[in-house]
Amino acid sequence: LLNNGEFGFVDISGIPADVRKFRPTHGSEERKRFDAIDDYASKLLGESSQNLPAHTLTSSVAARTKEPQGFVEVCLRMLVADGTLSAQRTKTDFLLGLSANGKQKERQRSFAASFAHELTTQAERIAGLVSHRLTVGTYREELLRELLQRHIPQRFRAATGFILGIEQQLDIIIYDAIDHAPIFQTGNLVVVPPESVRAIIEVKSSLTPAFLRDALDHLDGLQHVPGFDQPPAFTGVFAFTRPGTS
């Protein structure tokens, strides 16, 4: 919260809870910037054995995210206001740390990050042994499919194959195996009805702008397949690496 341009607090007890807004609107550019600051600040505090002075944390996050220090400072205040961070006043500054809620969130983030580390390690292992790009790509698709299968509800299956009426093979299809049996299945290759599909994921070893555009165009075209939108299916693109900063 702003207090004459300095880190401080104001009384919000008289403001109804349903109109308090501690974070930018979902989907906005400010929210993306805010979330990046939230993630990195929480990571720094999670790795630290003690709370950090506000000016130290602000400088570190600003350097990492390339955001203006003033914007970072406002975001940190918002994180204090919404209960993610705790703040303790000192004679010259504020000490910032993770609140109980913030620590739980950081544990969940670290847990999710462990999956990324697992995938990266296994993907690099095969790439170090085999130079055949198609084989490496197929293996990496299988790594992601197996990971998803371990963590999605049992009624769903993660496979590769086709949706009836669509000619192009899809890298990963997650479908409802309880209410809809595959029309064809051999191993992990399936042909499923559109109404059974709950998610489609396109997988690439390296994400380039050209691949991203093609993948998004392809996924967008699926929205017009009869039955595919009942209920709406998740569509996404997954890449193991992203070259450069484009």
Image (tube, grey):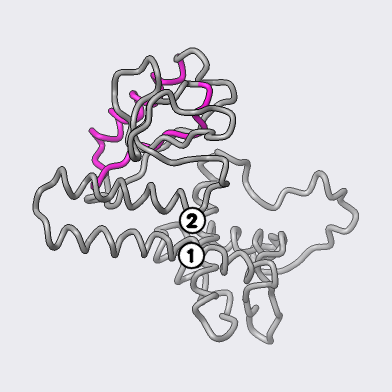
Q: Which of 119 and 11 is in front in this view?
A: 119
Q: Which of 172 and 70 is in front in this view?
A: 172
Q: In this view, does 104 lie above or below 92?
A: above
Residue at the image point whose x is 90% and y is 54% from the top: 14
Residue that lies at the very extreme toward the left in this rendered image? 131
Q: Distance between the residues labelled 2 and 1?
A: 6 Å
Dividing the picture into quarters, in which one does residue 128 lie?
Answer: bottom left
Give the magenta part as a residue range. Answer: 195-224
Where residue 190 appears, as percent x and y from the top left, is: 37, 31
> Which image quarter is the N terminus in?
bottom right
> Which image quarter is the C terminus in?
top left
Q: Nearer the viewer, residue 90 or 42?
A: 42
- Left or right side of 26 for 115: left
Where residue 67 appears, as percent x and y from the top left, is: 44, 57
Where residue 205 appears, as percent x and y from the top left, is: 24, 47
- Left or right side of 63 for 196: right
Residue at the image point whose x is 46% and y is 21% from the top: 193
Q: Name the residue under label 2.
A: 36
Q: Do the residues labelled 2 and 1 touch (CB within 8 Å)?
A: yes
Is 23 in the magenta? no
Q: Which amino acid does label 1 sit on?
A: Tyr
Where residue 241 appears, as percent x and y from the top left, is: 27, 52
Residue that lies at the very extreme toward the right in this rendered image? 14
Q: Is residue 16 above or below residue 209?
A: below
Disc number at residue 55? none
SS at mark 1 in the image: helix
Q: Mark 1 points at which residue?
A: 40
SS at mark 2 in the image: helix
Q: Is residue 205 above or below residue 112?
A: above
